[in-house]
Image (cartoon, rainbow, N blue to C red):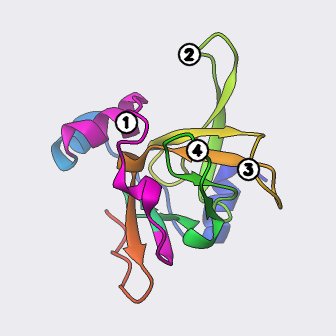
């Protein structure tokens, strides 16, 4: 299934903004991670220890990406999940280090979230290793923000 088809099936349209527009909307640290593929220091995000029930959303466009039910403690110092919500992330190969990795990003705004590895727990065996600054957490019982336009 193509990324465009997945987006249509999930009921959201791509959000296209220039880097200059994103730079005006986001704090510098978030912009660097989401649109320059930077990485925050391990163990620096309060979301790493977030244990409440809720939804993790893209900090740029507010698309829900992960359920708290898929979060687990990986020991890496970054919030980690064993699966994303269906159709919410897209992947590409990253060759910035010596070995190739799989980067994943928000399927709506293309904001860089992190990398996915094949060393996670059952049932998927995947570990979505996410930058905390690329996410916001919305606890159950609190209304999700409207998608950014």
Q: Earlier in the sequence, mark 2 or mark 1?
A: 1
Name the residue at 39% across, 40% down.
34
Q: Nearest to the eye among marks 1 and 4: give it.
A: 4
Residue 140 is one of the magenta-drawn residues: no
Relative placement, left or right, of 73 versus 14 is: right
Using the image, tell me which numbered label, if any, was put on residue 96. Answer: 2
Q: Nearest to the eye among marks 3 and 2: give it.
A: 2
Task: Tell me how far mark 2 sits from mark 1, CA to CA.
Answer: 15 Å
Residue of label 1: 33
Quadrant housing the C terminus: bottom left
Name the residue at 46% across, 75% down.
52
Using the image, tell me which numbered label, if any, was put on residue 75. Answer: 4
Task: Tell me how far mark 3 sits from mark 2, CA to CA.
Answer: 25 Å
* CB under 8 Å between discs 3 and 2: no
Q: Please tell me whether residue 33 is drawn above or below residue 75 in the rendered image.
A: above
> At which x and y percent is residue 83?
69, 58
> At which x and y percent is residue 17?
33, 45
Disc 2 secondary structure class: loop
Residue of label 3: 2
Disc 3 secondary structure class: loop
> At which x and y percent is residue 2?
73, 50
Few, some or many C-alpha atoms within 10 Å of disc 4 (few <14, some 14-19, many ≥20)? few
Disc 4 secondary structure class: loop
Highlighted range, magenta: 27-55
Few, some or many C-alpha atoms within 10 Å of disc 1 (few <14, some 14-19, many ≥20)? many
Relative placement, left or right, of 67 versus 119 is: left
């Amino acid at each position: 299934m193509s990324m465009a088809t997945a987006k249509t099936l999930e009921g959201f349209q791509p959000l296209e903004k220039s880097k200059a527009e994103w730079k005006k909307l986001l704090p510098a640290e978030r912009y660097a991670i989401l649109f320059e593929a930077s990485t925050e220091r391990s163990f620096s995000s309060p979301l790493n220890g977030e244990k409440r029930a809720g939804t993790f959303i893209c900090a740029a466009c507010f698309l829900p990406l992960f359920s708290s039910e898929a979060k687990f403690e990986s020991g890496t110092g970054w919030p980690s999940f064993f699966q994303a919500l269906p159709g919410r992330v897209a992947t590409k190969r990253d060759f910035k280090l010596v070995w190739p990795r799989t980067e994943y990003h928000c399927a709506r705004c293309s904001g860089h979230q992190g990398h996915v590895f094949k060393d996670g727990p059952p049932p998927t065996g995947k570990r979505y290793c996410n930058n905390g600054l690329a996410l916001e957490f919305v606890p159950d019982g609190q209304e999700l923000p409207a998608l950014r336009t």
